[in-house]
Each structure stands twice: as C-alpha cells, then as structure tokens.
C-alpha cells in the first residue's frame, strides 16, 4: 500500500483545478508507489526569484536613506527588483569616472537593494527631452553633433544617434558598465539601447537616416557583448531589420513601456504577448499615480485605483514577468488603494513553480521517482534565453542524516521554460543507490542553477515547505 505523506483536499484541490493545473495529455500516475507526496502551492510569499516580480524604481532625485525608509515594507513583502533608470550624464559625468565608483547615491541604492534581497535592472538613456538637464555628458556634447529635442528643450541637447564621436564614447561606456554589472548573481536584465525620449526608443533623430540601422546594430551589439551573462532587453516595436538583429541573431527579450494606454492598442497587445513564451516580457505602466485620471484618455478610468486594476489585468493577460510599483509614492499608493492588485500580480505575475506531486518506489538498487510540476504564474522562467542557456534544471537529491547531499540526479524529462499556460508536466527518473551505505535518507526536490557563482537556485512555491538544505524541498524518506 502506498504511503501518502502529504495530501490536500477540499479547498486546495479546488484551487488547483481553478488555476488550470492539469497533467500533460497521456501521462499516467505511478499506481504502485511506496510514497505519494502532494504539495500545495504557495500563492502569498514573496519568493524573490530571479527574472520575475514587482519592480521598484529609484529616481535620481531621491535620497537613498529616505527612499529606503519609505519602501522598506514594499521591498520586503512584494518587490523583487530595483530598476535604476539614470541618464548617461549621471552615470559618467566625466570621462572614465563612473557612478558605481564615485556617486554615493548610486552606491547606496545598490547596497540598499542587496540588503533587501532585491536584484537589479538597468536603463541608461541619452536623450535630454523633458529632463531639465543634459542626459548625455557635456564632455560628449562638446564634440558630438547634437540638436535640441522637440525644437524647444530649454537649451538641453541630444546627440544624433549616428554621430561617430557619440557612438565611440557610448559604446566605451557600455563596455565599462558591463565589466561592473555583467553579474547574474546581482542583475536580472539590462535595457540594451538607451536612445529616444526617456530611453524608450522613440523620436530618435539621425544626422543621416541611412546610418540608422548601422548605429542601432553598433549599440545593441555592444550591449550584448558587455552583458552576455544577463538578459538583454529592447522596447517593443522593432522594424524587420532591427528584429532580425536583436531577436534572431542576439536573442534579446522585449519590454513595453506605456502599458494600459491608447499607445498600446489591442493589436499591439496581441503581437506583444505572442512573443511569449519564447521571450521573457517586461511591462511598464504608462501613467504614474499622480496623473490626472479624471481627464486622462477622456476620463476612461476616472481614478488611479481603476487604472491600476486594468493594469494588473493587462499584465497577466499579456504574460509579462515584470510590472512596476514605480517610485516610492506610487508604491505606497498601491498598498493603500489597491493591495489586492499587488497580491494578485505577486501570486500570478511571472512564474511561480512548484512540484504538484511526487511519487516514488524502491526497486532493488534504485529509486524510481515520478514528479509532476506546475507553474501557477502567467509568465515563464526564461531558462530558454540565450544567455541563461538552460542553466536551471530539476534536481532530485538524497540527503543523509546530517543533511549532507550524497546523491544528485538532474532530470532531463522537463525543461522548466516549458512550464507555461497552465500545463502540468510529468517526468520519471531513476536514482541509483549503489554507492550509498544502508541507512535512512531524505528525498529532496529542487530547481537548481547548474552554474557556480551564478544566480540563486529557484525557490519553489510550496506552501509551508520543509527545506532540507538550500532550496531543496523535503519530499519523503527512503530506507536502504
């Protein structure tokens, strides 16, 4: 008779059915298992896994100490990343002098993120439109052909995107930037272009339009070379020629700024979400909480609360892995006026993977383990990204009485980036017992990073999980 070591009925089973948790067509359960362990999904904890979650922004004008005091609860309970979106002028005010070495605000933002378990994302932009200052360093503008954005911008300038001096110095900065932050233990993704208003890749001007594609290629290739261990991201809306470079050749992922606005019509939503699950997707709200929603888009929403609800709904429907809580004031408004929306995206946005069931039996000198997996989220663990290169694997571990891992089996039966769209996938693996001494062992299950000194193992979304060590979740006992 099988021993059922953990089982959930009633509400938990109903929840699994509601979220579309179904076994892959044709799969069958191990009917003669010695042990059956059924896990309940954790939909509430902030797992702080890489490549997913709510994002906080730290504007350049904010002071780190005051900022962290305001968002401390948000950072702990809900956010997964800190998005640093600064101008190039702020990042390299003098040639060869970088913010990460000499700007105390920047250093304290990064240190504060690390102390709170937040990973980093970056955008460095060069267009001075509506910035109230030059976004490109003055020492570059002194030599590069430049213009005043929108014809009137307070005298603040932006270099033409194809200017040779600009391209030389910008790509040199990108190289230095990568030497510091091409670190998957710290960084999730980097926006890998930076031109256009606020770096959103629109309203770009060229001195010679014929140079546009070559300049684009120069910049994105510099980013890909400098950041080859994290995910490169560009904005949605690439031309056929640009898409061939960044997607087909370089393997970039896509973000869409201007979410939940007339700038992002239904046709674009469909095309954008169609990039999933081949790509990890990033969403950003069009409007901050201080916008006049009584008049925005003819009063469509009326209030920020209504807008925020539509925003979360769109984010889930388009399969984005990230959504912004934005700056400190907006993040606090989320908690005050739409806490349910915050919890909803935390639970369902991006990926939230757990082993729905583990069955195993001992046969002679081996243990046969059948394990079923489900992603409660609407996004993807982007293991298929070119720079991640399938580094995450499902692992079955045996631990001795002291908690030492004495056997590890990596499963080839399930690719974790395939855990999308409600499918429950199942695999069967064998663990050899030949090299183990008689005694009692604990079976653990995990999604591990197979690269050393890299981003963390994945925290499984198991409610009330018993951890053996690291991210291995206890699945049962084995006697030899």
Image: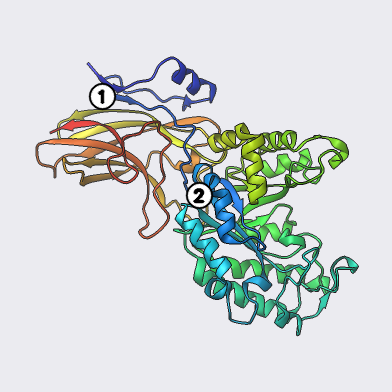
Label 2 crowding class (10 Å Cα cut-off): few <14, some 14-19, many 20+?
many
- Answer yes or no: is residue 378 visible: no
Question: What quarter of the picture does the C terminus occupy?
Answer: top left
Which label's residue is closer to the chain start, 2 or 1? Answer: 1
Q: Note whether 231 is above or below 74 in the view shown.
A: below
Q: Nearer the viewer, mark 2 or mark 1?
A: 1
Q: Which of the numbered marks, if any, corresponds to residue 35?
A: 1
Name the image quarter holding residue 158.
Answer: bottom right
CB atoms of marks 2 and 1 within 8 Å: no
Q: How many marks?
A: 2
Instruction: Residue at 26%, 42% (x, y): give it.
Output: 397
Residue drawn 84% across and 38% down?
A: 294
Using the rendered view, name the quadrant where residue 455 is placed: bottom left
Left or right of 356 on screen, residue 212: right
Q: Is residue 114 visible?
A: yes
Which residue, given by chain and number where applicable, does mark 2 sit on? 384
SS at badge 1: strand
Position above or below: 385 against 367: below
Q: Residues within 10 Å of mark 1 (few under 14, many from 20)?
A: many
What's the residue at 44%, 51% (across, down)?
A: 390
């Amino acid at each position: 008779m099988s021993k059922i070591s953990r089982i959930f009925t009633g509400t938990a089973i109903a929840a699994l059915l509601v979220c579309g948790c179904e076994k892959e067509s044709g799969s069958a359960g191990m009917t003669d298992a010695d042990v059956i362990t059924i896990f309940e999904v954790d939909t509430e904890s902030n797992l702080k896994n890489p490549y997913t979650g709510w994002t906080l922004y730290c504007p350049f004008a904010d002071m780190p100490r005051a900022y962290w005091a305001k968002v401390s609860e948000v950072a702990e309970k809900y956010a997964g990343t800190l998005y640093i979106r600064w101008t190039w002028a702020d990042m390299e005010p003098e040639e060869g002098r970088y913010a990460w070495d000499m700007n105390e605000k920047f250093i304290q933002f990064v240190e504060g993120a690390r102390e709170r378990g937040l990973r980093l994302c970056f955008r460095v932009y060069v267009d001075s439109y509506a910035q109230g200052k030059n976004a490109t360093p003055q020492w570059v503008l002194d030599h590069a052909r430049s213009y005043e954005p929108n014809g009137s911008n307070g005298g603040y300038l932006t270099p033409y995107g194809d200017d040779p001096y600009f391209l030389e110095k910008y790509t040199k900065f990108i190289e230095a930037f990568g030497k510091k932050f091409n670190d998957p233990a710290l960084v999730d993704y980097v926006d890998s272009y930076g031109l256009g208003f606020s770096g959103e890749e629109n309203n770009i001007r060229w001195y010679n339009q014929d140079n546009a594609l070559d300049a684009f290629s120069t910049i994105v290739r510099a980013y890909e070379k400098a950041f080859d261990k994290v995910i490169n991201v560009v904005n949605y809306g690439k031309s056929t020629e640009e898409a061939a470079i960044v997607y087909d050749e370089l393997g970039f992922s896509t973000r869409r700024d201007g979410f939940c606005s007339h700038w992002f019509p239904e046709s674009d939503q469909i095309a954008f979400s169609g990039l999933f699950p081949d790509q990890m997707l990033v969403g950003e709200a069009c409007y901050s909480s201080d916008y006049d929603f009584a008049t925005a888009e003819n009063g469509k929403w009326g209030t920020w609360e209504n807008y925020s609800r539509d925003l979360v709904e769109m984010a889930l429907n388009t399969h984005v892995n990230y959504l912004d809580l934005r700056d400190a004031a907006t993040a606090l408004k989320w908690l005050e006026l739409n806490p349910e929306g915050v919890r909803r995206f935390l639970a369902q946005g991006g990926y939230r993977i757990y082993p729905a069931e583990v069955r195993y039996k001992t046969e002679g000198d081996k243990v046969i383990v059948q394990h079923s997996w489900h992603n409660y989220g609407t996004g993807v663990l982007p293991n298929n990204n070119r720079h991640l290169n399938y580094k995450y694997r499902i692992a079955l571990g045996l631990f001795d009485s002291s908690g030492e891992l004495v056997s590890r089996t990596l499963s080839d039966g399930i690719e974790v980036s395939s855990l999308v769209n409600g499918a429950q996938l199942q695999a069967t693996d064998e663990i050899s017992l030949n090299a183990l001494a008689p005694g009692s062992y604990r079976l653990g299950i995990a999604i591990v990073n197979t690269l050393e000194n890299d981003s963390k193992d994945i925290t499984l979304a198991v409610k009330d999980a018993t951890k053996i060590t690291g991210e291995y979740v206890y699945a049962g006992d084995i006697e030899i």
